[in-house]
Image (tube, rainbow, N blue to C red):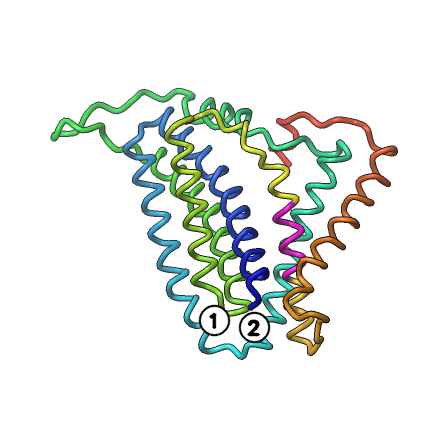
Amino acid sequence: MHPSSDITLAVAVFLGSAVESVEALTIIVAAGVSRGWRSALEGAACALGVLIVLVAALGPALVHLVPIDVLRAVVGTLLLVFGLQWLRKAVLRAVGLKAKHDEDAIFRQHVESLSAGHQAPGPDVAGRPARDATGFVVAFKGTFLEGLEVAIIVLGLGGGDHQLGLASAAAGAAILVVAAVGVVVARQLAGVPENAMKVVVGLMLVSFGTFWAGEGLGVRWPGSDLAIPVLVGIYAVVTWALVQLSRPRHRAAVSPEQAHAS
């Protein structure tokens, strides 16, 4: 791949993984605060272990067993669908039909739900905090589901052009950055510009999806990989136009609770 294409791919994977990591961190912190940190951290660690095994098992199969043109066509189509979903939500938020993602509000909802009628378990025989099954399951489920989306991004973007190493490194960096920030700021997650990041990631996903789906179907793009930034620009203009055309007709705001419920 051209160096600029490598950078674009790495940025797309990093931002997409960061978005999902923030959402997973919200659930882990909520489970830790309300049900105990030992169970929450163990659940998150187990989920990460399962995801690493899945990526390690599926990655080599994608790279070595599937013809590159077939892989690009399939992955490109999946990325288009995935990216369009992100852009659709971004447009709905921009025009006021869907509330912007509020991690603090979601955190409070998780804590209230998990804390209802809960009494903290006493220490185990070794004097350590006892395990809490609910906290473990909530943290495992949240980490696994959000991590599964990270795995899809890594396998989709990285597998489409045999760049799994680069995609995995970018995803790992995003997870480490979000984890480090989480240790420092804990529950103060609302400052992360997640909505803007989702727009950027959505643009990159649909651009890579268009590029690879076209290559898989025999399209030869002018400038080869340099066509990807051009596609990003085209989709950005289209998204901006959709927002501008839709905004005058839709001004009703949506509460964060309604957005989370949807």
Of residues 186 and 99, the one drawn nearer to the viewer in this rendering: 186
Mark 2 — residue?
Answer: 71
Q: Quadrant of the C terminus?
A: top right
Q: Is residue 224 left or right of residue 244?
A: left
Residue at the spot 43% in from the left edge and 57% down from the top edge: 168
Where does the image place residue 193, in percent across and percent down from the top left?
Answer: 58, 34
Of residues 131 and 24, the one drawn nearer to the viewer in this rendering: 24
Q: Residue furthest front?
A: 3
The reply to whether discs 2 and 1 touch (Cβ–Cβ < 8 Å) is: yes
The image quarter containing residue 241 is top right
Is 202 contained in the magenta span? yes
Residue at the spot 66% in from the left edge and 73% down from the top edge: 215
Residue at the spot 69% in from the left edge and 47% down from the top edge: 87
The segment highlighted magenta reads 200-208
Residue at the spot 55% in from the left edge and 56% down from the top edge: 7
Where does the image place residue 123, in percent across and percent down from the top left?
Answer: 19, 25
Q: Secondary structure at mark 2?
A: helix
Vertical position of residue 125 compared to residue 6: above or below: above
Count residues near mark 1 (Cα–Cα under 10 Å), then give few for <14, some for 14-19, many for 20+. Answer: some
Q: Quadrant of the N terminus?
A: bottom right
What amino acid is found at the position of numbered circle 2 in the picture?
Leu
Q: Is residue 226 left or right of residue 237?
A: left
- Rounded to the nearest whole Å, what is the CA distance between mark 2 and mark 1? 8 Å
Is 122 contained in the magenta span? no
The image quarter containing residue 103 is top right
Where does the image place residue 188, in percent across and percent down from the top left?
Answer: 48, 25
| SS majority, magenta | helix
Mark 1 — residue?
Answer: 62
